[in-house]
Image: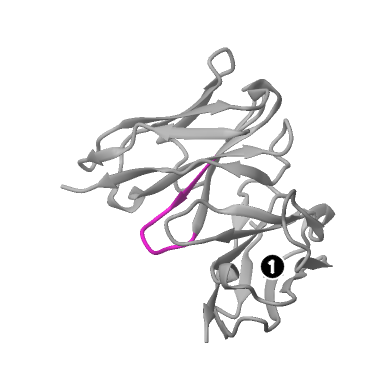
Amino acid sequence: EIVLTQSPGTLSLSPGERATLSCRASQSVSSNYLAWYQQKPGQAPRVLIYGASSRATGIPDRFSGSGSGTDFTLTISRLEPEDFAVYYCQQYGSLPPLTFGGGTEVEIK
Amino acid sequence: EVQLLESGGGSVQPGGSLRLSCTASGFTFSNYAMNWVRQAPGKGLEWVSTISANGGSTYYADSVKGRFTVSRDNSENTLYLQVNTLRAEDTAIYYCAKGFRSSWRGFFDYWGQGTLVTVSS
């Protein structure tokens, strides 16, 4: 089983600042099949990034993903008010199980 | 427009059963794998199960194996999750999510709004 560890648990930032979220895998993620999701309170998650670095349809270019192997990063270049949310990484290269990280909350400072 | 609408959740006693449904529209349902993901109150996301596009392959998390059964009716564009022998720790919002591919090896590109299952005596 691939365990995904996200850090930090909470990120306190102001609008306009840059956010850097980390996702570390316990073993290499096959084909870099790593996705990032955003979840706001009371809403379902939505995909932001897949294949470690490809933006999903309709996702603003301030969101970017990078990394390979066991270390992955989601960067939000300039935080907008609507970006304050919880972010999850997920690996879909090995099953079972498909695994999610524990999440990083980006909160307003 | 892709839409996924879950139903069938509710309050049940430990040991009870429910059948969750997810009705899909806006895409060719039979071409894509489908998934169930749950989220306990105040907690993170947990993958539960995946079924391939033709229903021939199914996969489960260890925590639900032997108690939950995933199935689909491609003629009705509907995904199901039969949940049996429910435990308190199964209390969660259950989301259905569309896979990006016909097999399990895809991220989840669309999600429903979820249905709440509460297990309590």
Q: Magenta segment, which residues? A: B36-44
The number of discs equals 1
Question: Image point 75% across, 76% down: which residue?
Answer: A77
Q: Could you tell whether B29 is left or right of B89 in the image?
A: right
Residue occupying image coordinates x 51% and y 56%:
B45
Identify residue for label 1: A26
Which residue does the image show at 46% across and 30% down from the upper left?
B69
Instruction: Tell me the quarter of the image containing the N terminus of chain A.
Output: bottom right
Figure check: B85 above or below B23: below
- Of residues B44 and A3, the one nearer the viewer is B44
Q: Vertical placement of A101 versus B73: above or below?
A: below
Q: Is residue B78 above or below residue A14?
A: above
User: How many C-alpha atoms fall within 10 Å of the one at disc 1: few (<14), some, or many (≥20)?
Assistant: few
Kindly indicate the quadrant of the structure image that contains residue B8. top left
Please give the name of the residue rendered at 66% of the width and 27% of the height, measured from the top-left corner. B27
The percent position of residue A97, horizontal first and vertical second, equals 60, 49
